[in-house]
Amino acid sequence: MRSRRLRIVVVVAALVMLIPLSYLQQSIDRDRFLYSLGEPLEYWRISQLNVQGITGVIIGAVMGGFRGVAADMLWLKCDEYFHTGNMQRLIPMAQTIVMLDPHFIDVWTVTGWHMAYNMFAEAQAMDDWEGQVRWFKMGIDWLMDGFQENPDSAEIAFNIGWTYYDRMDMYPEAVKWLTKTLRSEAPPEHTGRLLGHAYELMPDIERALEWYYRVLRVTPDDGTARGATITLKMRFAHAWRLVEEEKYDEAYQEVYSWLAAPHGDTPNRIPWHLIATIAEKQGKFELALKWWERSGNQYQLDELAQRRIHALRRQLGMPRWKREYPGWDAPAVIQE
Amino acid sequence: MSVVWAIAKTTFHEALRRRVLNIVLLFAVVSILASRLFSWLSQGEEIKFILDMSSNSIRFFSMLIAVLLGASMIPAEVERRTIFTILAKPVGRTQFLLGKYLGGVLTLLTNIAIMGVIYLVVLVFKDRSYAFNATLWEGVLLMVMEVSLLLAIAVATSAVASTPFTMVFAFFIYFTGHMGEVFRQLSSPEHVSNVGVRMLMGFIYAILPHFPNFDLREPLLLGEAVPLFYVGKVIVSAVVYIGVVLAIGHLLFSQREF
């Protein structure tokens, strides 16, 4: 009788202990989330993924706790898809990998680059502007998701900045992300210089010079930064000051004179962007359009010029622009 | 206490002679060594691959050892009829169960120690700084607690069930315990409208052991420190859970008629 009573006491005690135990476990779950000690895998998302590479072996690996190893294996498969040109399968595979291991930085950066560059180029080859924009946005969104998962990753922040800078010439956005890169512990060493380039192409000559000087303070041997400070000061610093003083006619004349003078080589995009921006500030939109077209015709990848051309042509009620490559011997100035 | 210790020692010595457990240990050692060989799979992040694969190998093979060992402990004694001899002596069923469990824990500790030494050697050869990382050893400690809990579940079940049933049940609890997040989500009105189903899912979530809490792989790979109070809370929860499971096991075992 006594032993039976003891047994009942033991059962009741064990069951009662389950209540504080449950609270303790849930409190540990919350700590785990608060201190970022591991994100729970949303298993049901596996069924939503359209990936043929999700084999029983991989699911087994995931269930057994080998999430990282499974992610590595799938990344190898991604590499194979990439080299065989099987792009449509690569993206869902990458989505699976980051679900398994959201801190796999290479998957975020390489897939983002793949969307914003390779898929973008495919759309470009078909003359599909909307397709290009869609792939660019997908690449950026992918990288931003990666940054949300890895807010300390300088690599992802840099890739976002670089993609804005290089792919679409969206310099204000590029500056925002490259600056964010510099706040991290180990930013790529050419980030400061890239900020200088972004500002000079924007154009904001004063800030470009400021960044080149900052780079030179850290790395006095940086030839690019040194060269850029000299050329910017010699060529456009004064014109930019005139712009800031709202003396647009004088600024325009100064840049125009520099472009018209014989230099021996075709100018890069900076003076064209600068003079077109000055013309826009003067309210001379047709003239600005001609300068943007001069740059866009010369440089196929001048996305900033192309965006301004599309916008200005729409504003002026003009038909769609078609690029005409003028060759490298064409004069730097336009017929006003 | 000396009775419990005597049973624990015998269980430990028996377990060391079991070929199947030694083969599992051999696989674990090969897997840890292979993590060094296959680290090229994760180019540029080889150390991450080694840490990930080795720590998961220790976890996976320790889990296998815990289930195989725990599931066969009492049924084997019944099958060999040695349990009648033991229980005929002044040995209580509680002492017997506790002795068996402690012997199992000793076996697990020995196996994990062997795997840990191999892990340490592999790490020292790759990157010495990781070998003395606090998070790594906190992770191993929590791993010991995790498999000790799983062993308790297996021992308690084997008190009344056959070896195959216990193995299936322990694996089931282990994998469901890793999917606690699914039950948590299913207990919220966002995902399920039926109140009854929600309550059932909530109950399962509340009583299941939350095995992912024992996993410190992520902070280890990201090089982040783990608050000591977190480790403490997980250890306390494991000890309480083991106590509850063994109490239930004791109850089932004491009811059993031979």
Image: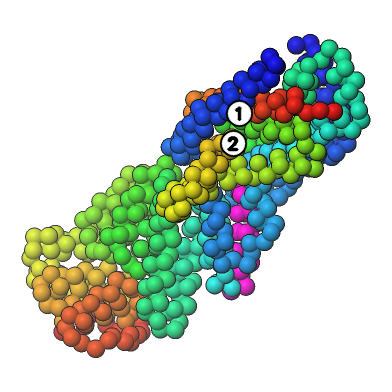
Q: Are marks 1 and 2 in contact (CB under 8 Å)?
A: yes
Count of numbered tags: 2
Side of A322 where A14 appears, left or right: right
Q: Label 2: state its secondary structure.
A: loop
Label placed on residue A212: none
Observer-nearest residue: A31 or B33?
Answer: A31
Expressed as whole percent of the image width and height from the top left, the position of residue A13 reads 58, 22
Q: Quadrant of residue B218?
A: top right
Question: Which is more N-terminal, label 2 or label 1?
Answer: 2
The structure residue drawn at horizontal position 33% and vertical position 73%, both measured from the top left corner, is: A302
As drawn, is B144 to the left or to the right of A274? right
Q: Which mark is residue B241?
A: 1
- Residue A76 colored magenta? yes
- Please tell me if label 1 and label 2 are on a single chain: yes
x, y (%) of residue A261?
A: 22, 75
Q: What separation in Å lies between label 1 and label 2 (alpha carbons)?
A: 8 Å
Please provide the residue range marked out in magenta.
A67-85
Displayed quadrant of residue A278: bottom left
B106 or A155, nearer to the observer: B106
Q: Residues within 10 Å of mark 2 (few under 14, many from 20)?
A: many
**Kind of residue indicated by mark 2:** Pro
Q: Quadrant of the N terminus of chain A?
A: top right
